[in-house]
Amino acid sequence: MNKDNKFENTVGIESTFPKDMPNEHGEIPVWNSENWFYEDVIIGHKIRSLRRTISEGEAMQFNCMVLDMHPYVGDEHFAKNEGMFQKRLVAGAMVFSYGLGLVATNCVNSFSYGYDRLRFIKPVFIGDTIYTIRTNMEKKPKYEKMGLVRTSYEVFKGEGEIVLYCEHLHSVLYKTPEDFKDKYEKK
């Protein structure tokens, strides 16, 4: 572990070594991608994203894309004059999507299994700036070739006000499946 930082950087530890490009290109670690395995997951490991301000234009584009035209997210007049917050909200689905996307590691050995405990704790408004902290919570052998890893996502706005919480379950490939042959759930 790096003595200056509590948590090691895990991006680009190894390459995926694709066969459909020159070897010298395939040996270069892939940007914004990881290829850690179940055995590499460190419980308690955290990463924090950069901050991201949500604009009015992208909020409306998201609303149109998912057909969410609720007056709180799509009607400035209603939100300002009749809404309980006196301003427009960012759709919760957008906060969820952005919050997870901000810390997406794009691990080539990990696949989404589902989400638990999704909570919208505080409203997010047009112009708010958010960031996310992801924490590895637990892992357990599950299948012959993959285990389950649970991570939490905490999305904050401003100077640390939590707005969203959820837990993500990932199925993650074992580096050495034979080490788990007697540990996973049999059907």
Image: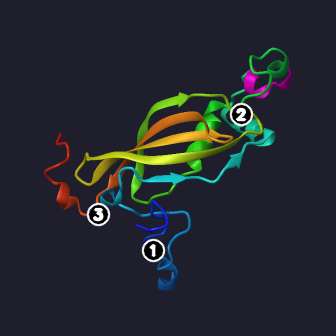
Task: For marks 3 and 1, give the one nearer the viewer.
Answer: 3
The spot of residue 165 in percent (x, y) is 52, 35
Dot 3 and dot 1 residues touching (CB under 8 Å)? no
Residue at 51%, 63% in the rendered image: 33
Q: Quadrant of residue 185?
A: top left
Q: CA distance from mark 3 to mark 1?
A: 18 Å
List the residue tagged with mark 1: 18
Residue at 61%, 40% in the rendered image: 156
List the residue tagged with mark 2: 63
The spot of residue 63 in percent (x, y) is 71, 33
Vertical placement of 107 versus 100: above or below? below
Q: CA distance from mark 1 to mark 2?
A: 38 Å
Q: Amino acid at mark 2?
A: Asn
Q: CA distance from mark 3 to mark 2?
A: 41 Å
| Secondary structure beneath label 3 | loop
Task: For marks 1 and 2, give the one nearer the viewer.
Answer: 2
Vertical placement of 155 versus 75: above or below? below
Q: Amino acid at mark 1?
A: Pro
The spot of residue 159 in percent (x, y) is 66, 42
Q: Quadrant of residue 61?
A: top right
Dominant SS of magenta comes to helix
List the residue tagged with mark 3: 175
